[in-house]
Structures are given as structure tokens and as C-alpha cells.
Image (cartoon, rainbow, N blue to C red):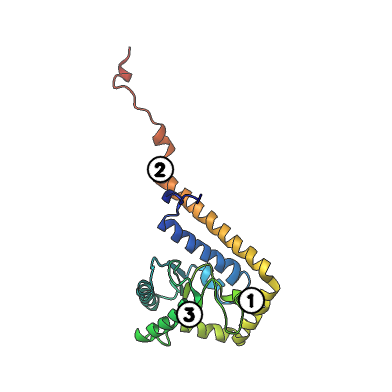
Amino acid sequence: MSAAPASPTHQPSEALAQALAQAETRAWVDRAVIGLNLCPFAKAPQIKGQVRYVVSAATDPAGLLADLINELEVLAEANPERIETTLLIHPQVLGDFAAYNDFVAVAEDTVAELDLEGILQVASFHPDYQFDGTAPTDIDNATNRSPYPTLHLIREASIDRAVAAFPEAEAIFKVNIATMQKLGTAGWAALQRQCRADAALQVQVQAQTQAQLQSPPQSQRQVKSLPLDAGSRD
């Protein structure tokens, strides 16, 4: 006998799913990108709150493209002190890496069509990211493996400053590969589990905080009305 389908009430709501996606991506930035020093330039904007995390609700490439255009325009117009960079997370579309890779080319063309070449660029992260010449199981690929398909929108000026501050920036890739090989498959899997645990805890705390803010104060809940003649007794 086949198992009964799960009750819809047990499925995460769209809002909860988006909150988890954002929280897990934040945890990945903290634990992997910054924690493993995969990007020496990521810590400062993360600490300053200048990283914009956006979870797209798109379920097809057309919807994602619309979100991408919006986020490119938002980043281009924003003060860098407020938004330094954007991570556009899209859990419901382009889960297949080949399809995602094709879309990255569309994203790059879109940057040009918006006259943002030389101003912004798009970097790619995906749960199944695979460099040319590697096997899907090679740990080297983990340097670009995010919890969900993600488009990283970067300011060209930020890259220029980073290169100026770190003249041997091209060596970062080799260092990152060595870091992943030292961490190993088991270590990477443990880090991913920790990111998921961090996200679940963060979302739980946020939900509890929101529930407390929406509920009436304890003093109001305990107030009992007195009879109208309570003060007129002899």
C-alpha cells in the first residue's frame, strides 16, 4: 500500500520557505564564504548590513528575469553605503545546473541591455555548481555551491577596490580549492548541516518574536471586569 500524501497543513508556507531560504543563505555566507575565507572582501559588507538578500518567488525563467531586472536597477540606484551587493536567491526555478548556467548568459546580456556594463556584473552560485573539467562529486566545486540557486549582483567599483587592496586576487581561486580539499567531503557536509540548523533556529526565533509582538500584554490578558456596583457595597 502506498503512503498517503502529506497533509497540506504540514507543508511549509511560501513565506516560511522564503524565510528559510534567506536564513540559510545568510548562514552560508557567514560559515562558508566568510568563515572559510573564500572571499576576503565579504566580511565588511556583511557586518555592516550592506548585503541585500532577496528571495525570488519566481517559478519560471521569465519571472526570474523580471526580478533580476528590478534588482539590478535597485542596486545601480542605491547608495553603496546602504546596499553594497545583492544576492538574488531563487529556490523554485533553475534547480538544474545546466539550465541555470544558460540563464547566467541571459543575465549578463541583461546587464548590457540596461547599460550597466562597467557598473554591475553577475556572479553565479548553485547547489550543483560544477567547474569545467571536474566531476560532479569533486570537492573543488563546493567553492561556488550555495544552498539555493543564487545570482550575485556585484558593483564593478567594489571589485576594483578589492583588487587594489589584494593585488594577488587571482590567487584566491587556488587558495579556495586548497581550502575545500583540506575540509573534505565530510567537512563540507557538516558545514551544510550547520547552516540548515542555523537557519531553522533563526526562523524559529523570528516567529516567536513576531508572535509575542502580536499578542496582547500579559497584564491586559489577566484583567477581569468588575461588577458595576462593586464600589457601592455598604
Q: Amino acid at mark 3?
A: Asn
Of discs 1 and 2, which sits in the foreground?
Answer: 1
Q: Are marks 2 and 3 in contact (CB under 8 Å)?
A: no
Which residue carries the number 1 mark?
138
Neighbourhood count class around disc 1 (C-alpha, 10 Å): few under 14, some 14–19, many 20 upward: some
Q: Nearer the viewer, residue 204 or 51?
A: 204
Q: Amino acid at mark 2?
A: Ser
Give the farthest residue toward the top. Answer: 234
Which residue carries the number 3 mark?
101
Quadrant of the image containing the C terminus = top left
Residue found 44% across the figure and 83% down from its top = 105
Q: Height in image: 69 above or below 20?
A: below
- Cα gap from disc 1 to disc 2, whole angstroms: 50 Å
Neighbourhood count class around disc 2 (C-alpha, 10 Å): few under 14, some 14–19, many 20 upward: few
Q: Nearer the viewer, residue 13 or 227?
A: 13
Q: Quadrant of residue 42?
A: bottom right
Q: Secondary structure at mark 2?
A: loop
Which comes sooner in the sequence, label 2 or label 3?
3
Q: Secondary structure at mark 3?
A: helix
Which comes sooner in the sequence, label 1 or label 3?
3
Q: Quadrant of residue 137?
A: bottom right
Q: Amino acid at mark 1?
A: Asp
Q: Height in image: 182 above or below 216?
A: below
Neighbourhood count class around disc 3 (C-alpha, 10 Å): few under 14, some 14–19, many 20 upward: some
Q: Position of residue 86 (x, y in %)?
A: 45, 73
Which comes sooner in the sequence, label 1 or label 2?
1
Q: Secondary structure at mark 1?
A: loop
Which residue carries the number 2 mark?
215
Q: Position of residue 151 (x, y in %)?
A: 46, 75
